[in-house]
Each structure stands twice: as C-alpha cells, then as structure tokens.
Amino acid sequence: MPYQKNRVNDVIAVLSITRVKFNRKTYYRNSTELRKEAVKEVAEFELRIKRYKNEDSALKTIHDACARRLKPDIKTIKDFDELVN
C-alpha cells in the first residue's frame, strides 16, 4: 500500500505546485508548462530526500504518476493537462 500512497502524494504535490505557480503568474502560461515545472520541482525534492537514486528516475516516476498511473480516469498526460487547465 505505500506505493499507492506515494502515487497519490506525488499527484497532489504536482497539483499544489501548479496552483501556486498559476496564482503567481503575471502572464499567460498553459497548464502543460506549469505541470512540467511542477514535476521537476517535486522530482528534485524527492531526489534530495533520497527517495530516488537519480534525477531521470525521479522525473519519469513523478510524470507517470500524473499520466499512466491514473488510468482509467486519465489515459495520457494530455488528459491530465486538460483537467488541470
């Protein structure tokens, strides 16, 4: 069950950072740009606390939590971005 909890926490972290970045923006930025930045921030944090061994693994896992691991509700990262938008 810890795996499931990590997946939910990862998605919540990405959504939280996306919301903060959206609220701070002074010009239009689409949800895809904001999500990419949020995924990178979450991955960097998780790498610092040694949840992952390298940056590539962290980035891919956090990205997958927002896309493939939310099936059947979210089928692709584009679906995720559209819901966030």
Image: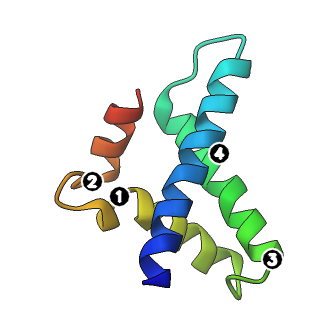
- Rendered residue at 60%/31% (across/down): 19
Q: Who comes first in sequence, dot 2 or dot 1?
A: 1
Which residue appears farthest toward the bottom when viewing the image? 53
Relative horizontal placement of residue 35, taking residue 82 as reference (left or right): right
Task: Name above or below for residue 33 compared with residue 47.
Answer: above
Q: Who comes first in sequence, dot 1 or dot 3?
A: 3
- Whether pointer 1 and pointer 4 mark residues with C-beta atoms closer than 8 Å, the reply is no
Which residue appears farthest toward the left when viewing the image? 72
Q: Who comes first in sequence, dot 4 or dot 2?
A: 4
* Viewer-nearest of discs 2 and 3: 3
Please give the residue where the numbered disc 1 appears in the rendered image: 67
x, y (%) of residue 64? Answer: 42, 66
Give the quadrant of the C terminus: top left
Residue type of the residue flagged with mark 3: Ile
Q: How many marks?
A: 4
Relative horizontal placement of residue 17, taking residue 32 as reference (left or right): right
Q: Which secondary structure, mark 2?
A: loop
Q: Which secondary structure, mark 1?
A: loop
x, y (%) of residue 58? Answer: 62, 74
- Whether pointer 2 and pointer 1 mark residues with C-beta atoms closer than 8 Å, the reply is yes
Task: Name above or below for residue 46 compared with residue 27.
Answer: below
- Rendered residue at 53%/65% (across/down): 62
Q: Which secondary structure, mark 4?
A: helix
Please give the residue where the numbered disc 3 appears in the rendered image: 49
Disc number placed over residue 76 in the picture, else none: 2
Residue type of the residue flagged with mark 4: Glu
Which residue appears farthest toward the right when viewing the image? 48
- Whether pointer 1 and pointer 3 mark residues with C-beta atoms closer than 8 Å, the reply is no
- Rendered residue at 62%/24% (across/down): 22
Please give the residue where the numbered disc 4 appears in the rendered image: 37
